[in-house]
Image (tube, rainbow, N blue to C red):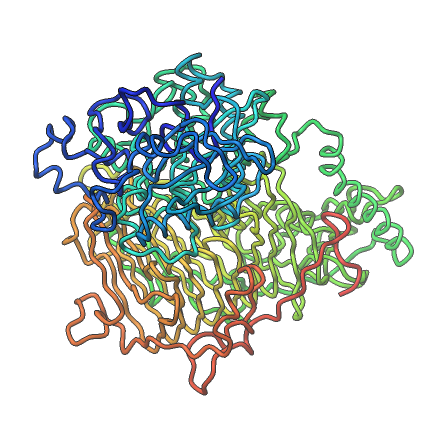
Amino acid sequence: MDSTPDLPPSDADKGTLPDADKGKLSDATGEPANGAMGDASTDPHLPPEVAGLEDSPSAQELPDDDLAAAKTVIRKAGGGTPANALGHSPAEIASVLLGHHLNHFQLNQLIGGGGMGAVFSAHDTRLDRTVAIKVIPRVGEDPDLLRRFRNEAQSAAKLDHPHIARVYDVGRHDDWHYIVFEFIEGTNIRDLVARDGVLSIDDAVYYARQVAEALDHAHQRGIVHRDIKPSNVLLRPDGQVKVVDMGLARTMQLEVSGDMTASGVTLGTFDYISPEQARDPRDADVRSDIYSLGCTLYYMLTGRPPYPGGTVLQKLLSHGNSPPPDPRELRLEVSDDLTAILHKMLAKRPGDRYRRPLDLLADLAELARRENLQRSLGLGTLSIPGGNSWLTRLERHLPWFAAAAVLLLSVAWLQLLSSVSALDVSVPRPLASAAELISEDAPTADAEPSDDSDSTAVAVPDVTADAVVEDEAMQPPQITEIPVPAELQGSETPSIVSLPTPDTTLAATKIRVGGPVDAASDELVASTFSAALSLAAEHNIQRIEIASPLISSPPLVIEQSGLVIVGPETGCQIRFESSPLLAMENAVMVDIGEHRIRFENLQFHWKVPSNAVHGGALFHVAANRGVYLENCAITIDNANGREPINAFHIGVAPPPSSSEGTVSTGPPLVAIDLQDVIARGQMTLMRMSDAAQLQLRWENGLLAVSQRLLETGGALSKPPAGRTQLKLLLRDVTAYLPQGLAVQNLGPSGTVPVVINRNCTNCAFTTDMGSAHIEINSVADLNDGPLILLAGSGNHYDSGTGKSDRIVAISDQQDDSVLYRLSDLAGNSPPAWMKEQAPQSVINWTQPTAVDQNPTHLMTPQDFQQDGTVVPGFDGDQLPQLLPAQVPAVSERVSATP
């Protein structure tokens, strides 16, 4: 059984170095591999993975041009330590210190070494215990190494978790600096697999979950490990994992200087390094650790790293460009679900990986439940309820019990008021909905040109409240018998009402949800929102009025076009508390599909469940030309950071292939119109896997989200010439967008870029440092274009502390890119696609730090107040008054009073 300390570098698990190997260190995996690395002591600043690289056979096999073209940060640090100084390599340090004391620690055995020094087992004479102690070389007051030493000590001291080896002490004795760690009895994953072969699926998931827990603990404290690999995952005899070697860790809040980056130790190990960390170590964050854990999980499942062959440079290029390998090619029993999890961990772009270790933990927990992995199920860190527990069944059926009770009370009340057998109501014509005024036959002024005379693509026009439907076809049907709604049925009431003459019509103009019952009114009454939707579809009623200020609802499906759903003038909060879907399925709260609909005075609130690890959407929209929201609010409480979560998920089926000789009209049109709307929460507002012909018009609103307004893929086929695909028209909107307004990621599902036509007037935008207002990735040629059209006037872009002045960033498939900043576009020679008039770079926030103090789902218009008389952004007087968060006692319950 090996004895391995807390923070050993890559060879800490090898025990005492043989005399013949003293001063030598292994390659990236800790074992002899293609291109041995040579003597690490040639430069004390370089980690073992890099030291001697230029003299190795691997490096000699590569042409100079290939080495020069490698986009990898592999550099020597200049100066600092004299070349003849003692104590450079672990063996040299051991020759001086073995058997001696550093303060009250007696060094007994060299058990490992790495880029920052040597690791010893030692006896703490003061507390009479065995510890591991890491000693860095005698460097005097070398500022670079001392800064790295302090960084490691401070990082390790912040961590206190059962799956991370603990730090006990830090000190100095003469010219020697040291850190004292918990001493771990056990073996490491690399040696375990080398000795016993690949791990079982259950064991691999069990160990990966424990490492993810450790990473989550470090992530919550702003620490990135940056060297997760099999040899740094130790297993105690009881099966508990200990993550070791914080030698590369750094605090995310720490100011990292250029020389610290250049010193080499920031690289990590080549077989397990993330693409962004290889390019620039300063880009490493917790998603880089998740990538390295994915490589480690792949090793546990297959016995080899993801890209085992080739030189060091070839490994780095594979991490950056090669698709994630499929473990099923080496091991058939790996399931599709586990492969999907692994590939998400190994995604090339950090944004495509799990955003936090907690997300990965949720998926691994769900995988363990689905595949009945007994050992993994024994971990109690994250519990996702299964479908067979009695409590789950009770929660699932409780809404129906409650609805039945409300129904019985409603029937008793109605029987006291009047008899329903003689119900006879005159029917005025219903008001037109927003969708009904969108003509299929006559395009509006904003309509897109079409090459097909039988098809028009139109935008959503302005809708007046007093517009009336003149088409006789829209009149209610004349029916002599009609089923009585369930809410009106009693024990003595027949299910069918017989009307006295054929001329008598039972046709309500609207359905009311909640509030007091008026038997003389011309409306049907529903006890729940879902019941109202069913009644509307059954009887072709196109108006639903909600009288209650609060409703709790299960997921809903819209089954008819032309619906107008209206809340009281003071607003109605519709809360979606949970989803009945499995954790690894996408949740949809309101499935609108292709049905045109209008919402007024409604405030949608969705608290995303912690087990919605594969995300979901508040609204799902298909090829729909009429989704209209007025005086509404959208709040998504996604505090657990489930991904991806959207307010609108737009899924449009690809158009049929055009026959020869015909002209393709491109993908269908999707039109969404927002008027006086607030949208906030941890989400992207709109997401499309494949680009549709999106037309978004938003007048007066607040957008406060954790990501973007729009994220989309490219088109599946080239759109007709001159057709604008993505049209974003915003007026008087304040937008808090940490990751930017829009991104278009071209990939296998949609490789054809589409034009983003953004026309904004009097808007205020704030974006975090490093992000661009509009981003397009993986184009074939940077000279293609124009891919963006910017128009409008009176817009302000926050360029204060921590904010970005990047407006457009475009990258191609070779990772070349072009960037336009606000100063480039506002100068004397802007590009031809820049039509915006006089963009400004200053926003005078009344409370500049207010938005940093609240999560996005709690942000309000008051957080975005500005000083001055002429300000960009929303008109607060016209926005809805946000209702306080309330939790009804029973799902699908309506409030008793308006």
Find the residue positioned furthest to the right. 416
How many numbered marks does the figure carry?
Answer: 0
Question: Image check: 461 left or right of 485?
Answer: left
76 is higher (above) or lower (below) than 11: below
Question: 575 or 355, which is in the foreground?
Answer: 355
Side (left or right) of 690 relative to 489? left
Where is the C terminus found, in terms of image quarters? bottom right
- Residue 409 in sight from this viewpoint: yes
> Residue at point 75% right, 51% down?
893
Image x and y of residue 128, in percent: 60, 32
Residue that extends furthest to the left in the rendered view of this protein: 64
What is the residue that sits farthest to the bottom in this orientation? Answer: 869
| Residue at image point 61% right, 20% down | 374
Residue 223 in view, yes or no:
no
The residue at the point 20 percent across, 57 percent down is: 818
Q: Is residue 747 above or below residue 571?
A: above
Viewer-side residue, 466 vs 220: 220
Q: Position of residue 184 (x, y in %)?
A: 52, 28
**Could you tell me residue 373's position as x and y percent?**
57, 21
Q: Nearer the viewer, residue 758 or 506?
A: 758
Tell me which residue sits at (29%, 34%) in the image: 89
Across and down, in percent, residue 193 comes to: 42, 17
Is residue 412 toward the left or the right of residue 128 in the image?
A: right
Q: Nearer the viewer, residue 263 or 63?
A: 263
- Residue 471 to residue 67: above or below: below
